[in-house]
Image: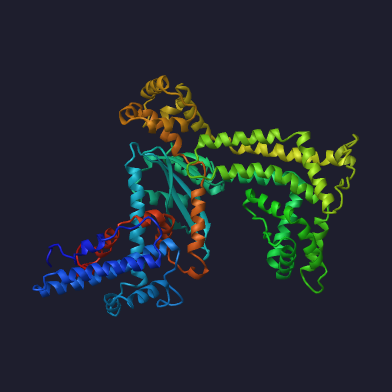
Amino acid sequence: MSKRASGLDIRAFFKAKQPCSTSPTEQELSAELNERQELVMNSEEEHDLTDKPELELELVENEEVSTCNHKLKLRVFNNRAQMKCRGHSAEEGNFQTYLRDKAEDDPNLAGWLQKNHSYTSPDVQNEILSIMGNTIIRGIVGEISALPVLQYSIIMDGTQDISGTEQISICLRYVDKDLEPREEFVGMYEASSTTAEHLWKIASDVLLRLNLPLSGLRGQTYDGAANMSGHLSGMQALVRRVQPLATFIHCGPHCVNLVTQAVSSSAPVVNDALHWIHDLGCLFGQSGKFKTIFKQIAISENGSVTTIKPLCATRWTVRTPAIKSVLAQYELVMAALEEMAAVKGSVSAPRARGLLDHFNKGTTILGLVLGQEIFLKLEGLNRSLQGRAVTIGGMLKAVECTKKALVAGRTDDAFMSLYSRAVELTTSFDLESIKLPHVRKASNRYGGPAKSHIPSSVEEYFRVQFFCASDTAVTQLDDRFHQEGLGYLAKLEEHLLTGKCHEAVARYPELDAELLQVQLAMMKASYQFTSCQEASQLLTTMVPEVRRLFNQVETLIRLLLVVPASSCEAERSFSALRRLKTWLRSTMTQCRLNGVSVCHVHREKLQAINREQIAVAFIGMSERRSHVFGAF
């Protein structure tokens, strides 16, 4: 085949239009393909027709390339738009439907689809998905390998998909050339067992395949499950036996979640109120009759409806939206429960009567008001720790700020303000007044001859519970964030900020303690900084020659930034898993799931992929494809 430049050159065909940075719509795809067809037709008119055999060969080969381009564009579009390829049968999916629709306006594509081949089969689709996913992952690993000093951390978490298969999400964290922390998802991996040994085998195999040596592993972050965080036989312990410098951090948001759970259990008035809200949400979701009644009442009174949802059994830091929803619609809830309780023959009527009895008490209002005050602070802390760029130093400062706010709110005046608000709401909703519960006299067998304490007022009784909840929050924050790994990193940050040499520096081979001491003194003589973030910003604003003077300081800053504060990136990949592997796609193979999930999570990287590179890789995997599509 001639290599001369012509309008039908397949290289020019693929380079005619670069991928855009926004999501391609079907109209944009159609317009782009029509534009390319016009280019080919115009070039055909200008081409020297004396060499007909060679021209016919080029035309045939461009038909194959055009079809290959159709397929690649569709795979990219489907992955970015979360569209499934197949339907009830192989011929009813979006992939085949799109090709048939485009074939109506493209004779070349129509003729190609009628040939006896398997280039639209699920196996070929999986192959293309795998190539695209591997290309994205190679780009991520390439950025890590190109760092001045190899430092990265691993984030892992597990969940079950719709088919009951245990999926392990693995993410990598590193600090880029601009000293910005990056967290990247690299795949879902099926686990036949959730023991620490098996999970470590999966993680080590992934790192080996990515050509990332364990010598550069500097951090690991998981949840608090025993198989992950166990100090003797958990995965973090197994990793540290191989790489002692892989500092383990218990995920910050998970710690806050456990703190919130302990706070709820410490105050009965708050715990009971949350229980009734959960039962109300269950009734709303399970009883179509009650849902209809509530919506009718809400629309007639307010013109809009706010859904009442049950509380999540594991996510404790999402309580305040449910509390706000009930408090804002309390009268509507009471009216709906009264009407539902009067329905005869309904299995939900007894539940409605029981809930009506509890929601008619002022103590329920008081429990919601007191709980909301503490939960708002903890949920604010939880949200602040979920970003990809969160650092260990920033997390510890946020925890200290939250503790100060909780201590400041633990006063008689603060409690009386909340109690007065609860009394006002109780009066406005015409509920039973807040009363002391029946207090049983303690048996002498347990209390002895001493007289047991009996609260003298309602305020005193519930103030004790409020103070207990506040104290529990503060002590739990102290305990949960007092970790060995955090202590090591705090010492390193202290060394950065004060310049005082610490033995923790000597543990890391990439740090030269003497040279670091000199560079810190030089940097402090010319610049001022009070945190790791400020120091990193200073380095990024320096000219290259000055920045190279502080290469050891930069290495220390990278070490402080590379350790993850949370495993939220893995949690975000679970959201993608729920969108991708639904009950309609429950039989999706692991190979396909991995390719789809990587492409979907990294949509921007997918859009920037060079389709010619993907086509070359796809064609190069088989000699027969080289004969069909030609060489690039």
> Total marks drawn?
0
The answer to whether one can see residue 485 in this image is no
Q: Is residue 307 above or below residue 491?
A: below
> Left of 520 or right of it: where is 273?
right
Residue 80 location, quadrant: bottom left
Q: Quadrant of the C terminus?
A: bottom left
Residue 189 point in image, percent of width and height: 44, 57
Task: Choose between 43 and 182: the one closer to the eye.
Answer: 43
View extreme (left): residue: 50
Residue 595 location, quadrant: bottom left
Residue 423 point in image, percent of width and height: 83, 46
Residue 392 point in image, percent of width and height: 51, 37
Residue 6 location, quadrant: bottom left
Residue depicted at 76% across the width and 60% down the height: 333
> Left of 207 or right of it: where is 167?
right
Task: Choose between 381 and 2: the one closer to the eye.
Answer: 2
Residue 276 point in image, percent of width and height: 75, 56
The answer to whether one can see residue 559 in this image is yes
Q: Is residue 295 above or below residue 313?
A: below
Q: Is residue 34 above or below residue 440?
A: below
Identify the colour scheme used: rainbow
Residue depicted at 47% across the width and 25% down the height: 497
Task: Choose between 536 and 515: the one closer to the eye.
Answer: 536
Q: Quadrant of the N terminus?
A: bottom left
